[in-house]
Amino acid sequence: MALDTATDCRPLYEKVGGEIVALIEGGTFRVGERLPSIRQLSSKLSVSINTVMQAYAVLEDRRVIQARPQSGYYVCPRAPEITAHPVSCGQGFRATAVTFSDLCQLVIRNMMEPAMVPLGSAVPNPQHLPFEKLNRIMSAELRRFGSQSVSYMMPPGSERLRTQIAKRSLLSGISVTPDEVLVTAGCVEAVQLALRATCRAGDTIAVESPFYFNFLQLIAEMGLKALEIPSTPREGISIEALRYAIENNKISACLVIPNFSNPLGSLMPDDRKRELVQLLEGHGIPLIEDDIYGDLTFGQQRPVAAKSFDKKGLVIYCSSFSKTLAPGYRVGWAIGGRFQDEMERLKMMTNLAVASPTQLALAEFLANGGYDHHLRAIRRVYAKNLSQMSEAVARYFPEGTRMTRPTGSFMLWVEMPQGVDSVKLFHRALEHRIGITPGAIFSLSDKYRNYIRLSSAYWDDKSERGVETLGTLAKELLESWMQLA
C-alpha cells in the first residue's frame, strides 16, 4: 500500500480513503471484514493519526465502511442503499382515519412463536440480555424492600429509579430532576399518555412515513387521524414536507422516532432535530419523541434527543428499557415538560402504578449493575448481526434489492423489486415457519408494498438459512409477476 503524492493533488485524507476503496473493490477487504486500525494504517502509510481518522470518517459518511464500538472499522455490504423516499411538498397532505388491521394482529401473534425463525420481531434476543444478573438483583431487592416490594409505587414512580433515569438523561442532552420523570408501563404507555394529554378524538397527528405500525393502531384506537410525512433513511422526517403540512392542516401533535426510527433505522442529524423542535414550537404544536433505540448506537457517543433542544416544554420524551434490558419488565418513562402533571393524572386513572418489583430491580441495576458495560457488549453484537444480515440479503435476494444501512438498533428496511408483494411474501414465509414484517402495515396508503422489515436480533445460522429461503421466495414472486406483466 503506497500513496501517490507526486501527481495526485487531492487532500491527503482523500488519498488515504481512495487507497482503502481500491483495496475493497479489488477484494483485499471483503464485506464484513475488519480494516486496519487507525494506528496501524497511520504507521503503514506514514501519515498522521488525524489524517487516517479523517479518511475513515469520510468513508463512513459515504457508507463504504462502518464503525463498531470497541472493535474498529468494517466494510459495509455492497448492495445498493436506500437513500430516500420520494418527497413532494406540492401534493396536498390529507389526514387519514386509521383502521384496525387483522394483518397487524397476525404479524404480532407470529413474532414470538417458538417454532418460527424470528426475522420480523423488533424484540431483543434474551440471550443477549443480563437476565441472570437481573434475576439476582430482583431477588435481593425483594428481600431488602419486603413490604415496599408489594406496595403501590404511585405516580410518578420509584424515586430511586427516577433519579437514575434523570442521571442517564444527561447522555441524551436532557437536564431534568427526578420529579420531572414519570415511570410508565413501557414506552407504548408513555406515548399513549402523551397523546391523551395533547389530543382529543378527531384530532390529527403528524407521523413519519413509513412509521411503526403499532403506533398507527394506537392512533386508531384513540379515534385520532394520522397525517403521514415522508421520511428518509439518512435524515428522518422531512422538515420541509412537515412545514407544508402544518401550513395546510390543523395538527394537534407530532409523533416521531428521531434516533434509529422504526422501521427505517434513520438517525436524524442534530441540526435537523433542532429545526424540527423550532418549527413545532413556532406553531405551538407538541412533539412526542420516542427514543427507545437511542442507547443502541454503533458509534462512540450516544445521539442526543430532540428534547435536548426544547425551550418551551413542548417536547414529551418517551423511552423504556424494553430494547436494552428487559422487555418483560414493562418499565418505561416519560419526561412530559408542561404536560407532566396531566400525564401523571392520566397514569393514575389508567392503571394506578407500574409493578414495584421491576422498578426496584432496574433502579439497582442502573446504580450498580454495569449498564454501560452491558450496552457496549450488546452494541457490538447488534452491529455484527446487522452487517451479516445485510450481506445475506445482498447475496440471496433478487437483483435490484436495496436496503438501509442503520448506524444503530438491529432492524433492516429492505426494498425489493416492484413485482415482489411483501404481504404475499409474508404468507409464503409463514408456510416455511419464517416470520417477517411486511412493509404495507407501516403506512396507511399501501405505498410500501414491496418493502419488508427484518430483525437481526436473533441472528445465527438458522436465521441466515431463513434469509436464503426468503430470497428464493421473493425471486419466485418476482418471476410470477413478470410473466403476468
Image (cartoon, rainbow, N blue to C red):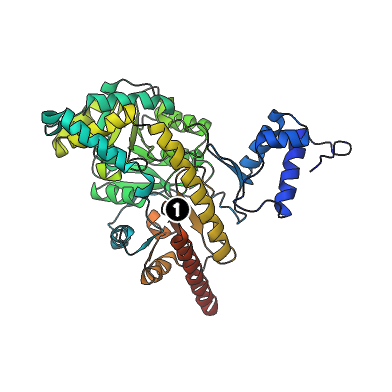
Is 27 located above or below residue 299 in the figure?
below
Residue 192 shows in this picture: no
> Considering the image in quadrants, where does the N terminus appear?
top right
Q: Compared with residue 344, is residue 422 higher up or lower down, i.e. above or below?
A: below
Mark 1 is surrounded, within 10 Å at the Cα level, by few (under 14), some (14 to 19) or many (20 or more) other residues, namely: many
Give residue 67's position: percent from left, percent from top.
57, 40
Asked whether, in this view, residue 381 is left or right of residue 175, the answer is right
Residue in front for this viewpoint, 101 or 359: 359
Where residue 293 sits, quadrant-wise, is: top left
Say which residue appears at 71% left-offset and 47% top-offset.
Answer: 21
Residue at image mark 1: 456
Q: Residue furthest bottom?
A: 483
398 left or right, relative to 255: right
| Mark 1 residue element | loop
- Counting from the top left corner in percent of width and height, residue 265 is at 47, 46
Residue 170 can be seen in this image: yes
Where in the figure is residue 257, as x and y percent of width and height? 41, 40
Residue 342 left/right relative to 429: left
- For badge 1, the amino acid type reads Ser
